[in-house]
Image (cartoon, helix red, strand yellow):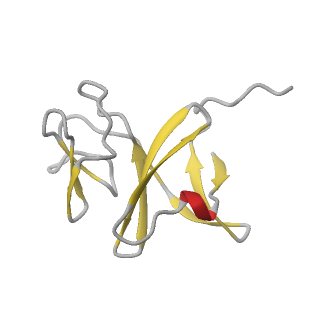
């Protein structure tokens, strides 16, 4: 696992969301009641962006076809069906960071 430190500009205000592009990933970050959640921005059904989906509590509805995903788990309600990758966000070495899996793309070293 790797940690990607977030800048202040990458952290959405309460009730807001933002898109982060890093390490070959597009990650949607949501601030719900002062808690941050991060998931892949691509719906596994047809690849639509999830960033602008309708949010109901912690359930996000894909704007393209209506599939719903829990921001905490990445799973569809009920735990069956398609899922999106969810990422942990927390303090690492004093910086708010997203934990990325080792298989995420890494930029080439110069």
* 106 sits to left or right of 89: right
Image vertical order of residue 74 relative to residue 11, above or below: above
Q: Residue furthest front?
A: 9
Q: Is residue 45 above or below residue 100?
A: above
For the point 32% across and 36% down, the residue is 49
Q: Nearer the viewer, residue 36 or 88?
A: 36
Q: Is residue 106 left or right of residue 87?
A: right
Front residue of 92 and 53: 53
Residue shown at 48%/37% (left/top)? 26
Which residue is depicted at the point 71% across and 29% down? 107
At x 64% / y 60%, what residue is drawn?
A: 7
Q: Residue furthest bottom?
A: 34
Image quadrant for the N terminus? top right
Question: Image quarter for residue 103?
Answer: top right
Q: Position of residue 37 (x, y in %)?
A: 41, 59
Q: Can you say which quadrant of the picture contains the C terminus? A: top right
Q: Is residue 71 above or below residue 40?
A: below
Q: Nearer the viewer, residue 53 or 107?
A: 53
The percent coordinates of residue 9 (x first, y second) are 58, 60
């Amino acid at each position: 696992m790797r940690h990607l430190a977030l800048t202040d500009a990458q952290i959405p205000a309460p009730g807001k969301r933002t898109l982060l592009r890093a390490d070959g990933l597009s990650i949607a970050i949501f601030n719900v009641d002062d808690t941050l959640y991060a998931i892949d921005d691509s719906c596994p059904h047809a690849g639509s962006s999830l960033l602008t989906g309708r949010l109901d509590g912690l359930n996000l509805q894909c704007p393209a076809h209506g599939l719903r995903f829990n921001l905490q788990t990445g799973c569809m309600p009920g735990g069956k069906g398609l899922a999106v990758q969810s990422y942990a966000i927390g303090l690492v070495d004093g910086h708010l960071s997203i934990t990325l899996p080792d298989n995420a793309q890494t930029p080439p070293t110069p």
